[in-house]
Image (cartoon, rainbow, N blue to C red):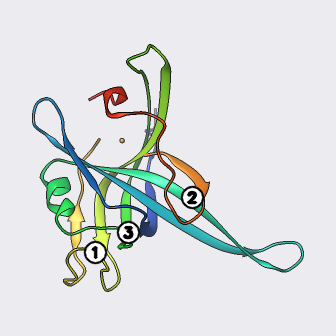
Amino acid sequence: MAEGLNRVTLIGNLGADPELKYTQNGQGVLRLRLATTESYLNRSNERQQRTDWHTVIVWGKRGEALNNILSKGRSICVEGRIQYRQWEDKDGNKRNSTEIVAQNIVLLGSGRGRDSSAPGDFGGGGGGGGSGSGGSTPPTDDFGDDDIPF
């Protein structure tokens, strides 16, 4: 039986500063909110834009290192896989999330982030992102830290 392929590549801008947390066993988990925007012409030949928001997770030392150089507005390219998770929050409600588990991150542009050094290539590690559509600010997740299953 042939194996499948779960691969995604996104190029966009960070809509918020990264959030670094640690699991109970001390492993770093970096959470990024990435905006991807596409431009198109509607039926009236008017230019329209659509922005989708993605949650990107980077595990381990790479996530810790990226936390020191990424900030809101930075352009990045993310290569990874889509991960769907389901869990129960502290109130017993079923929760779902869609995440991009980064396996590679490339810094793009001049870097409006904390460090404007030359673009770099950061291989990522495995862990979980949601997507939605919206405007210029990233939508907030509707769950708190106690609801995250790690």
Asked if the residue at tag 3 contacts the one at tag 1, i.e. Cβ–Cβ closer than 8 Å, the answer is no
Q: At 34% across and 78% down in the image, what residue appears? A: 108
**Dot placed on the residue nearer the N-terminal end, 3 or 2:** 2
Q: CA distance from mark 3 to mark 2?
A: 15 Å
Residue 52, numbered circle = 2
Q: At 24% across and 55% down in the image, what residue appears? A: 124
In x, y percent, where is residue 64?
A: 15, 55
Residue 77, numbered circle = 3
- Which mark lies nearer to you, 1 or 3? 1
Of 16 and 62, which appears nearest the observer? 16
Q: Residues within 10 Å of mark 1 (few under 14, many from 20)?
A: some
Compared to 95, does 112 lie above or below? Answer: below
Asked if the residue at tag 2 contacts the one at tag 3, i.e. Cβ–Cβ closer than 8 Å, the answer is no
Q: Give the residue type at disc 3.
A: Cys
Q: Residue furthest top?
A: 92
Compared to 15, does 94 lie above or below? Answer: above
Q: Secondary structure at mark 1?
A: loop
Q: Residues within 10 Å of mark 2 (few under 14, many from 20)?
A: some
Locate residue 6 relative to residue 51 in the image: left or right: left
Q: Secondary structure at mark 2?
A: strand
Q: Give the residue type at disc 1.
A: Gly
**Dot placed on the residue nearer the N-terminal end, 2 or 1:** 2
Q: Hey, which quadrant is residue 85 in on the image?
A: top left
Q: At 48% across and 26% down in the image, what residue appears? A: 95
Q: CA distance from mark 2 to mark 1?
A: 21 Å
Number of numbered discs: 3
* Tag 1 residue: 113
